[in-house]
Amino acid sequence: DDSNVPSLLALKYLGLTKEDDVLYRNTRKFVLSGNNPYFFKGKYAEGIGGPHVGLDMIWPMTIIMRALTSENEEEIKNCLTMLKATHAGTGFMHEGFHKDDPKNFTRSWFAWANTLFGELIYTLYKTKPHLLAKEY
């Protein structure tokens, strides 16, 4: 799977499948697992990267998309925690960051990821506002 949108993870977000589709659930489970060679798990986060910026580099867009395509509140909270922990003190989402060192990131300004993050916050505000009442 690729780390941007469109991607297999984003199929539900794109309106191409439903949450209860067995094939989508299995695909989602696969791309968010160690079976995906571009799924990286580190000290600060786990997510999908790709060959664009190198191994062990997670794209925040994949964490955002994971939250946007999840109905599981614990998973969404975990995504919010990871996003807060990996902006490297800049307050912005980056293209990618190293799984064990968020200060090692690419693109200090990546509008695509920042816009998608804004969409996540707005979506949660409209659908699950109680998740935004917690400090992450």
Image (cartoon, grey):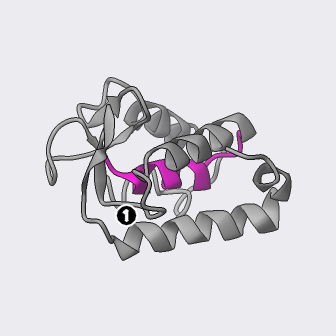
According to the picture, the residue beneath numbered tag 1 turns out to be 6
Q: Where is residue 84 in the image (x, y as percent from the top left)?
A: 54, 49
Name the residue furthest right.
130
Question: Could one spot residue 27 in this view of the protein?
Answer: yes
Give the magenta part as a residue range.
58-72
Quadrant location of the C terminus in the rendered image = top right
Other-residue count near label 1 (Cα within 10 Å), few / some / many at <14 / 14–19 / ≥20: few
Magenta stretch prevailing secondary structure: helix
Residue depicted at 31% across the width and 24% down the height = 35
Q: Where is residue 19 in the image (x, y as percent from the top left)?
A: 65, 48
Residue depicted at 38% across the width and 76% down the height = 111
Q: Position of residue 128 (x, y in %)?
A: 81, 56
Where residue 55 sits, quadrant-wise, is top left
Task: Name the one closer to the observer, 47 or 22.
Answer: 47
> Does 72 appear above or below 131?
above
Does 15 sit left or right of 48 as displayed?
right
Where residue 36 sits, quadrant-wise, is top left
Task: Name the one closer to the observer, 119 or 89.
Answer: 89
Residue depicted at 25% across the width and 37% down the height = 38
Task: Name the one closer to the observer, 129 or 81.
Answer: 81
> Does 5 appear above or below 32?
below
> Does 121 appear above or below 135?
below
Does 93 sit left or right of 38 as displayed?
right
The amino acid on which the numbered mark 1 sits, given as a three-letter code, is: Pro
| Element assignment for label 1 | loop
Residue depicted at 38% across the width and 37% down the height = 31
Task: Name the one closer to the observer, 88 or 59.
Answer: 88
Taking the magenta stretch, the answer to whether it contains residue 115 is: no
Q: Position of residue 27 (x, y in %)?
A: 44, 38
